[in-house]
Amino acid sequence: MKKILEIGLIVSLTASLAACSSGTKVPETSATTTDSPASSSAAAKITISSIEGTWQIPLSATGEGLKKLNEKFNVDYKPQFVPYDEYGAKLPVVMAAGDLTDIIGMESADANFFKWVKQGAFLPLNEYIDKYPSLKLVPKSVWDAVTVDGKIYAIPQYFPAKYGKKPVIRQDWLDNLNLKMPTTYDELKEVAIAFTKDDPDKNGKNDTYGIALSKQIVYGAHMGAQWDSGWYNKNDQGQLIPGIISEGFKEQTQLLADLYKEGAIHKDWAVSKMTDISKDFYAGKYGIWYEQPVGVDQVLFESMKEQMPTAKLAVIPAFKQEDGEQGYTSLPGYYTLTMLNAKLESDPDKINRILQMQDYFRTFIPVDNRNPQNPDFDWSNGGEGVGYQMVDGVMAYDAALYDKRPSSYFSGVTGWAPNDEANEPAKLVSSPFVKSFVNSAAELLKNTKFYINPVDRIHSEVLAAKESELNLIAQEWQTKMIVGQEPVSNWSKMVDEYMKKGGKEMINDVNKILDSSGIKGEWK
Amino acid sequence: MYNQKSMSGRLADIMNIILLGLLALLMLFPFYYMFTISFTSYEEYKLSELIFWPDRWVTDAYTYILKSKAFIHSIGVTIYVTAVGSLVNIILTATMAYAITRNIWGQKVYLFLVLFTFIFSAGMIPTYLIVKATGLINSYWALIIPGAINSFNLIVIRQFFLSIPSELNEAALIDGANDLQIFTRIVAPLSKPAFAAFGLFYAVGHWNTYFDAILYLNDPSKWTVQVILRQIVILNDTTNSLASAARDAARSGHLPPGETIGMAAILLATLPILILYPFLQKHFAKGVMLGSVKG
């Protein structure tokens, strides 16, 4: 029996070794092949396969939208959608198995992205950028994020850098209490306490809180670049450091600790889910929370208005910093990446066909032209009455129509707007309450400065390996500080632990890369 | 009847009934909650802390789900995979379990191989490579064949077979039955309760197929109901305020608006497998070896 066990172990070990070695091999070419690689005419039908993550309910592989897409571009497009939840698990398996498709999507330029770039899985795209107008629109700061040794390995998809989550306040509560919009942390503290104790909704009940907060300190009270988690602050050696251990963050944590003590933050925040807190905010329980000008939940807003007809939301303008700057940290300027399989190198027709399709869907249609009269808008949304309807001048469609819309099959790809304001988010919503919020938010952000986090533009392996683990350490300390189990004055102890557990190494590495690439944090 | 038990005994019974009854209700509460929420309007749900009885009963959530063909289709797919899969599971598990109860050559080796997979299992990538090499990618069989025999279930069924008195087999042998006949005429009928129990385990496993479906099936129209369900009820749980905005925006307009639909979807996805239980219940209850050896 013992002998058999030994043999069995040896066999299994060899088997697992063999499996591992095939796992690190450079992915082989896709299983699908082109119909006519030699032909250069656009008339040749090309089979194009893709794999990408999705947040949607899956689309039919025989949908009308896909048929239209195939006809228009003369392709046989075979998209594969994987729920984002498991995409991070499936993609490496597909890569290792050599099943890689022609087009590969990823949510962001993470550690795997750079690993695969190094293994030569993706096609460098530099020579193609200038050929396509929508690619030329991408700013350098965004290209930086997907560039390795001067080679661009991915097409970033557009997401407005300015329209991330911003702190919003109940303007009607401020008005009720005759308070003005806070401009410093002291004023913010006063306002939050007044929201808790002075019955801001005038219902005669002590049922409100100043700031809404959920577990893992989401989202906190970040009133500008100096106080949030981006790499803005510097240490004594002049190195950029992650926001989470900065003095600014300490100030923010101190505020949360003070507010917790005053009862202006819900006792159960550390165990509350973000979605529940959000729900409570729209039910009128909290005075300050986070919201964004694009993709808002209109039903939530509507229900709030119905319940509290006087409700009014406003984005809190960024506070003035000690260094004189004033503004929020911007988003990276993209959301999701599209890569091409390196094996396509020998097939320029296919590359160009793919990029044509990308360019088509990446071409920005001004909001005022998004109507049935615009042939591109009408076609990509499946045609009026088929894939969508116009309601009050805004496009509307429901779930049953997804697969009738060609754009659904390119859902990760949106038009690259010439600037964030061109998105005119207020025109895309129908409810007047949402419209007024989005309008005022967009207006405020239009004139707000934004800090471009330089770390979004580089790749540090140390950062990729350590950051999330280190953040958890800091978060644990800060959670204890906010609930009063640990004094905020112990901040330096937290920093020490952070540094010892790899923070120092990470900061050194990031700064070295920043110096050598000449990338700096900049305001825009 | 009444006099048989003392006063305190009866009191204890009553207490037990009350406490256990409450406990049972507690178990039912999540279902009740799902049920009511699924019939609540999204607006009402968003504004209320806890809903026991909605002000207005609406069927919006169900209309929404049933309108999209994907959900219904995926239920069909899952029923198919569950039915075929469980059948394959039971046939293969039972026949192999029977084989390794017999005193045949190599029985120990086979048993060892089974026990070996009980402890060691290949990783995801090697398994994927095998599934790929056998041409099962994008086929429902990829959900059925790789897990066709669960080694734990196999061992338990084997034990069950061993507990059948060998006199029965001997009697059959004397009557001229071969192994196959012994299995189909004697062992299998006696093992119905075990088959029902493990059939249910297998069925629940198939019904809950989630990751395998994502991994092996590339065509979304083949996805099982759990995959669709996950897409419906998944929440944006990014703690990063920067990434969170993009995700919220990416999801808005493409996803059903809110938890009421999620509740309805969960209910619809749980119901079919729940219905299976009462039908198999009687098999559990039956005495295993009742009257098998007489005279």
Image (spheres, rainbow, N blue to C red):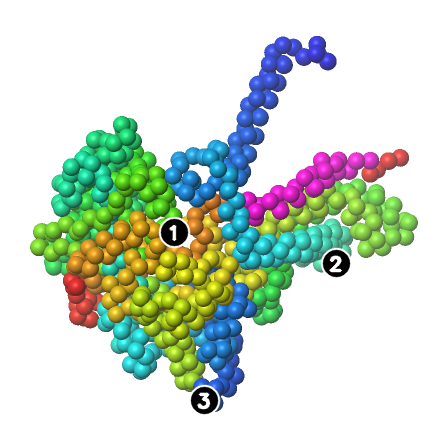
Task: Pick whichever, B30 or A454, lies toward us.
Answer: B30
Q: Which residues are magenta?
A: B266-291
Type of the residue with mark 1 = Asn
Q: Which residue is mark 2?
A: B105
Q: Are marks 3 and 2 on the same chain?
A: no
Residue B289 covered by magenta stretch: yes
Mark 2 falls within which chain? B
Task: Name the image quarter holding the N terminus of chain A.
Answer: bottom right
Quadrant in which the C terminus of chain A is drawn? bottom left
Q: Is residue B75 left or right of residue A99?
A: right
- Give the mark, 2 or 1, whose residue is nearer the N terminus: 2
The residues bearing labels 2 and 1 have C-alpha atoms spaced at a distance of 57 Å
Q: Is residue A107 visible?
A: yes
- Left or right relative to A282: residue A440: left
Q: Residues within 10 Å of mark 1 (few under 14, many from 20)?
A: some
Q: Are marks 2 and 1 in contact (CB under 8 Å)?
A: no
What residue would you read off at disc 3? A41
Q: Position of residue B226 (x, y in %)?
A: 54, 52
Q: Is residue A264 visible?
A: no
Q: Which residue is mark 1?
A: B236
